[in-house]
Amino acid sequence: MEKAAIIHYPADHFVYPISSNTLHIRLQTKKDDISEVTLLHGDQYLWADGKWQYEKTGMQKSGSDGIHDYWHAYINPPFRRSRYGFHLKSGEEELILTEKGFYEEAPADSGYYFNFPYLHPQEVFQAPSWVKDTVWYQIFPERFANGNPDNDPKGVLPWGSEEPSKNNFFGGDFEGVIEHLDYLVELGITGIYFTPVFKAFSNHKYDTIDYLEIDPQFGSKDTLKRLVKECHDRNIKVMLDAVFNHSGYYFPPFQDVLEKGEKSPYKDWFHPHSFPLRGGEYPNYETFAFVEQMPKLNTKNPEVKKYLLKVARYWIEEFDIDGWRLDVANEVDHQFWREFRQTVKNIKPDLYILGEVWHNSMPWLRGDQFDAVMNYPFTTNLLNLIAKKSITGSEFANNMTAEIHSYPANVYESAFNLVGSHDTPRILTECEENKDRVKLIYTLLFTFMGSPCLYYGDEIGLSGVMDPGCRKCMEWDEAKQDRELFSHIQKLIKVRKEEKLLANEGQFEFVQTDPNIVAYRKYDDEKTIIVLANPADESAEFVLPYPLKGVKVTNMLTDKEFAAEAENLKVQLDGWGFEILSFPASFTK
């Protein structure tokens, strides 16, 4: 038994409340080293004859990542408290793992064991319930549609007449979005994430001048109110982008510091290293990256905090937005985000708080800060699998199993999954213009755990390299749109909406029986859905490891039903092919 590889600590993704009366407990061990794990658990105050009284619950293997096995169990502590340990078996060897180490026999004193002191229902992680059912659509407002030429910025170019650059403008605005909301309804979209819409200098608007004003090129506040109402009338949620890590160069407080230096009353709003302030390749003040036009805000400063929290409240109270996406969220202090959460949730308890964090995000997802983060590890693994072809199906499953088990299950259900954005090359470009690969990527995106997001135009085959190439104008001429790709994505969204197991209900696990195929199932007590994906040019065959002879199987993309003729169903997959099949859950137990 490899003791050093047995990992558990009583916090975060290893033990947490998943409901008001249920604890979820996990253990990590070396792959194929442990054959059986039993959870020993009980109330620390229940004793008899000088011994602690505990129950035994078998732990199930919830996944393997090629290096580790993961075990889990659910328990319902009758008094909300639990001491617990693990009975491990490996061949003839048996050990008890407690907080104080390994023992050959279970200690009689509850003080030796791991402790979950008390399950407070108010501390159960709960993202807004509507998020699991939401299909997002990211809009870069300057490039989606020009609905009102009267508010065009100076020097605006005819729509789509040139390739996008860092400095050109095409006049996209709110009225353009309103004109095309029915298009989004047709596609099946139920949430819009807008990149920044506040007054700013650039076409991307991540360099804010005034956080309390709409950029004039997008329209007025009344136009935004109409846009939000039109969205809500169509059951579409609206999420705005909060750029609180840094302001823009022309933000009046920063301009005051540039002018007055150390005498400016706003000098502590930022992070100056010396005076006068100097830009250049390496500014003498802190910035986003080393971009002199984006000075970093001091969110510890009470005045800055007051101002930004006022901004957070204002757009909820006045415009009824449904979510905040937080730019460069990992570079802002945790205390600010805790106060931010309290502020916005007091106004609108089911508001969605989404952080931009590109790495492991557990410190922000303990229930006191964000509801979710942008799931870039999922993006990376999916693109490595299909676009870059740098990992195999089993490597994808291993990587994602490790990723999923690094968070509580109820946290991962609300992850914001994306395969492209304003910060990445277009997915069609990533796939070398191979539409079959793009269709496979979207099949996995819309059937995986989490809340999926489309980047505007990807559904009709827009291409483009990294910023600014990925920010071209939306193509509204249907003759120039890829309507087959649109229909494929539309069908996936429809299937996801109709089948709740695809919208984060039930359980999830990879089915790792073929190293070249990605296979996973979503299931509950009544139904199993199997998603199969062939991430290669060559056709392949996958044998479902379940006794399905005579069982009715439904192809969820074609709605065709058939009865399996053999004991183990063989599924033929074309190169870059996929299937989504459903059948009664009892045959997979």
Image: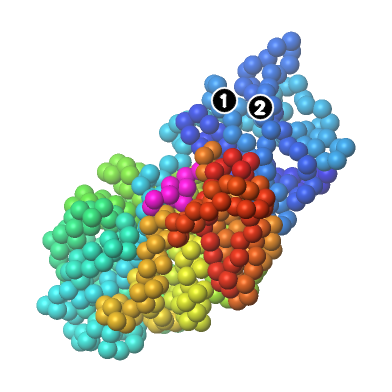
Percent from the top left, x then y, of residue 566?
66, 53
Residue 41 is marked as 2
Percent from the top left, x then y, of residue 320?
22, 51
As helix, strand or loop, the secondary structure at mark 2 comes to strand
User: Which quadrant is home to the C terminus?
Assistant: top right
Residues in magenta, as a range: 497-506
Instruction: Say which residue appears at 75% left-offset and 51% top-offset.
Output: 31
The residue where tag 1 is placed is 77
In the foreground, 9 or 467: 467
Q: Are marks 1 and 2 in contact (CB under 8 Å)?
A: yes
Percent from the top left, x then y, of residue 239?
31, 58
In the foreground, 111 or 16: 16
Instruction: Say which residue appears at 45% left-offset and 60% top-offset.
Output: 557
Q: How many numbered markers are drawn? A: 2
- Label 2 is placed on what type of residue? His
User: Which quadrant is home to the N terminus?
Assistant: top right
Q: Is residue 93 above or below residue 462?
A: above
Q: Is residue 500 magenta?
A: yes
Percent from the top left, x then y, of residue 179?
19, 68
Q: Is residue 69 magenta?
A: no
- Label 1 is placed on what type of residue? Pro
